[in-house]
Image (cartoon, rainbow, N blue to C red):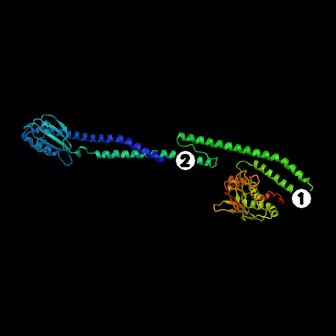
Amino acid sequence: MRRRLLLLTAATTALVLTALLVPLTLLTRSHAADRATAEATARAQWVAHAIGPALASRKERPTAEQTVESVNGPGLPRTSLILGSGATVGPGPAEVTDAVRLARTGRAFTYEPSSGGRQVLVPVHGAADGTAVVQVTLTGKQLYAGTLTSWLVLAGIGVGLVLLGLLLADRLGARLVGATRGLARTADRLAAGDLSARAAPEGPPELRLVAAELNRLAARIDDLLTAERVTARENAADLAHRLRTPVAALRLDAETLRDPEEARRIAADVLALERSVDDVIRKARRPLRAAPGADLAAVARERAAYWQPLAEDQGRSGAVDTPAGGLTVPVPYDELAACLDALIGNVLDHTPQGTAYRVAVTTGPDGRARLTVSDEGPGFPGSCARAAARGTSGGGSTGLGLDIARRTAEDAGGSFTVEHRPTRVTLAFPPPAPRDRPPPVGTRPAPPAPSG
């Protein structure tokens, strides 16, 4: 756009200047010729007036000849005196021309000979041997003296005007392009999910109007999403509160069982369900946009230890590979725990007993923390993409486990990948913001290990 505006300005300015400067150059040439002709006419008239009395007497003719010789010099128009007898004083024609004969009739005039230039002829009356004629000859160079300088000045003015027009067009183009690019950057940020992005109202009125409407649209989208999230959180909290009553009834029923071992096992499951309901309520009450960080390595060790008794009952070996130090990710503790529970639970529920699994926490070359849960089982039924889809399952489950893991990674700005045979689910998390701090893992006691 900026380049096209410059080209358009240059072409328009050049056309306008051409329409103006061509007549000016012709006018300058004509003016130079008129000025030189006027000066030559004045010279011829002065010479005729000065030598007129001297030509009345033959004795004074030398004085007239000296006057004619004195007005000739280098760079000056050629001035000559043609006497009535046909003799010529000064640099003049060798023979009497038709123009001289016409001037002897008493007419002063200017004409352009075929050889170029211009001649001025003025008659001198009262000469002793007839009417004499003073002739001033201008060459082409003398006739148009100063024209080249005037043309160069006009050309300089034209070039200056073109450059000035280009400068103004460039400034205008920069303003338009800058404002347009600002709108594009704001739109890109909004498309990427940054609803705090706002466009600066700058540029012409039309672009300022677009910026204002874009800001209003962003604010409206932000309000709608906030309202939707608030509604979803309130619905989740209401549902969780409603679940508390049947969970409490289950706990009471478990306590009335006669078999102590069975009662203890069911009570542990009910306690885990009750804590999951509490997690839903706590997450629903968390302020929007709050994203406290957690130690991914510590959470991985804790949840692997939680599921280890059940793995041992099924004859599985569960390896845990985590760094010695902490590895903070911008995901709350409860979401990380739910994600790991879903992934390890999938291994325990949908692979043959005795199948080994491994939980690994590493740091990739891009600086992202990676959580990998892998096993040596038969893999997902169907394609990996279909297995990761929400509500899809080929093993009789709800199909929400992998979707929970996927949303946990993507909501934090990370990625989620699934590989087949051997089965490997990898979650990559970006580093947390400086303000994020992982909550102490020990602040929340792990539920008792499930029994086989």
Specify the quadrant that holds the C terminus: bottom right
Residue 267 image offset from top left, x and y in percent? 86, 55
Side of 254 where 76 appears, left or right: left
Give coordinates of residue 362: x percent, y percent: 69, 63
Density class for disc 1 (Cα within 10 Å; few <14, some 14-19, many ≥20) is few
N-terminal of the two: label 1 or label 2? Answer: 2
Mark 1 → mark 2, Cα distance in angstroms: 69 Å
**Residue 177 visible, this angle:** yes
The local crowd at label 2, few if under 14, some if 14 to 19, many if 20 or more residues have their Cα within 10 Å, is few
What is the secondary structure assignment of the residue under circle 1?
A: helix
Q: Amino acid at mark 2?
A: Arg
Q: Looking at the image, is 346 positioned above or below residue 201?
A: below
The amino acid at mark 1 is Glu
Q: Residue furthest top?
A: 106
Q: Say which residue label 2 marks.
A: 181
Closer to the camera in the image, 74 or 168: 168
- Of residue 119 and residue 212, the one placed in the foreground of this image is 212
**Residue shown at 41%/42% (left/top)?**
12
150 is higher (above) or lower (below) than 410: above
Residue 310 point in image, percent of width and height: 81, 61
| Residue highlighted by disc 1 | 261
Pick the front one: 309 or 166? 309
